[in-house]
Image: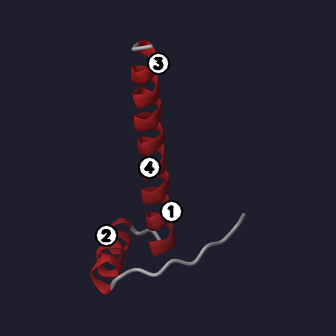
Amino acid sequence: MPSFSIELDPATANFYAMIALHTGLSEERVLADALFKLAGELSLEALCKAKGSQSTL
């Protein structure tokens, strides 16, 4: 599986570290899950917008 490196500002890093601590997951898993969920939400939003623009044609 491909691996990526990202830089986070200290407040964001601390936020994800606290979530990881409270859930018992690694910080990497928490970030991966958050990014995966965001990608799904953005994809769904784009599909809904595309469907809306097609119905007006």
Find disc 3 in the rendering and name its residue.
54
Does 10 sit above or below residue 49? below
Identify which amino acid the numbered label 3 is placed on. Answer: Gln
User: Residue 51: x percent and y percent?
Assistant: 45, 22
Q: What's the residue at 48%, 40% (across, down)?
A: 43
Work out whether mark 4 precedes mark 2 in sequence or the reverse, and give the earlier one.
2
Q: Secondary structure at mark 4?
A: helix
User: Residue 37: x percent and y percent?
Assistant: 44, 49
Find disc 2 in the rendering and name its residue.
22
Answer whether labels 1 and 3 touch (C-beta < 8 Å). Answer: no
Q: CA distance from mark 1 to mark 2?
A: 16 Å
Work out whether mark 2 precedes mark 3 in sequence or the reverse, and give the earlier one.
2
Q: CA distance from mark 3 to mark 4?
A: 26 Å
Q: What's the residue at 46%, 58% (across, down)?
A: 35
Q: Residue 32 shows which numbered tag?
A: 1
**How many other residues sit within 10 Å of disc 4, few (<14), some (14-19) or many (≥20)?**
few
Work out whether mark 1 precedes mark 3 in sequence or the reverse, and give the earlier one.
1
Q: CA distance from mark 2 to mark 3?
A: 44 Å
Q: Secondary structure at mark 2?
A: helix
